[in-house]
Image (cartoon, grey):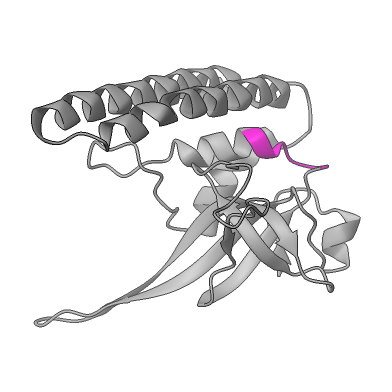
Amino acid sequence: MTTVQDLPPAPAQAANMAKRGDLVVFEQRHHDFVLQGESREYDTFTVGVVTSVTRDGQVKMWRRAGNFDQGKDWRGQPDRGEAAPARMVRSYVSSSTDINVAGALATAGCHVWPSGHESPMPFESLAEVRDWLKPHRKAGWKWNLLRDAGEAWEAAHRKAAPMLTEALRHQGEEFMVRSAAYGAAILAANDAYRAAYAEAIS
């Protein structure tokens, strides 16, 4: 586990330990196999928040940007998200004392696929992660604006979530109408956050 460069290291990271609530970036390697031509190997970098750690301070569970704490899981246990990726190359952690996690998760959650859907897309490099998340360092005062915008972004996503649940109860045209309404609500929430981000870095 390594501390993300350009983000101020904390004592926890200096001791190679993570804490719940810290920001984490997982680097994963992928292999695309094709029937014709050359296969492709590449890395992706996915941002999330640490939700559980091992006794020696390694990330055990995490929740990726765009996913939210549901309170209890199907067993009635606290929702810890998902296990750390088994095939990760390495993890990078930044302490919540040095970076605003709520804002950073919103920024990563608004980094979406170019298909027109507002689904979060992993970053292509660690340098890209650093660039996007640099405004969330707890230095100066603008990170406070992104903290508030990030909290509003999460609240808007949570408010829209029942719309998707309701859409999935229907089929055909009714599903399409309700699903489109949910998509519009998510797009509006993301666009509002993007506008706040653009203003903060201007």
Which residue is nearer to you in this view: 51 or 4?
51
Report the quarter where the C terminus lies. top right
- Which quadrant does the N terminus fall into? bottom right
Figure check: 110 above or below 187:
below
Residue name at image x 18 percent, y 31 percent? 175
Farthest residue to the front: give it. 75
- Looking at the rendering, which quadrant does residue 52 occupy? bottom right
Relative side of 200 to 124, left or right = right
- Asked whether residue 101 is drawn in magenta, I would say yes
Front residue of 122/174: it is 174
Residue 44's quadrant in the figure? bottom left
User: Depth check: 167 or 90 in front?
Assistant: 167
190 up-or-down from 87: above or below = above
89 left or right of 175 in image? right
At which x and y percent is residue 110?
Answer: 44, 35
Q: How many marks?
A: 0
Q: Nearer the viewer, residue 120 or 61?
A: 61
Q: Residue at x 19, y 81 (%)?
A: 38
Residue 159 percent coordinates (x, y)? 48, 23
Residue at the spot x=11%, y=82% of the render? Answer: 35
x and y, in percent, of residue 126 in the image: 54, 58
Where are the magenta residues, as a range? 97-102
Residue 139 image point, x, y percent = 79, 32
Name the residue located 27 percent from the left edge and 31 percent from the top edge.
167
Q: What secondary structure prevails in the magenta region?
A: loop
Task: Confirm whether the magenta stretch covers residue 167.
Answer: no
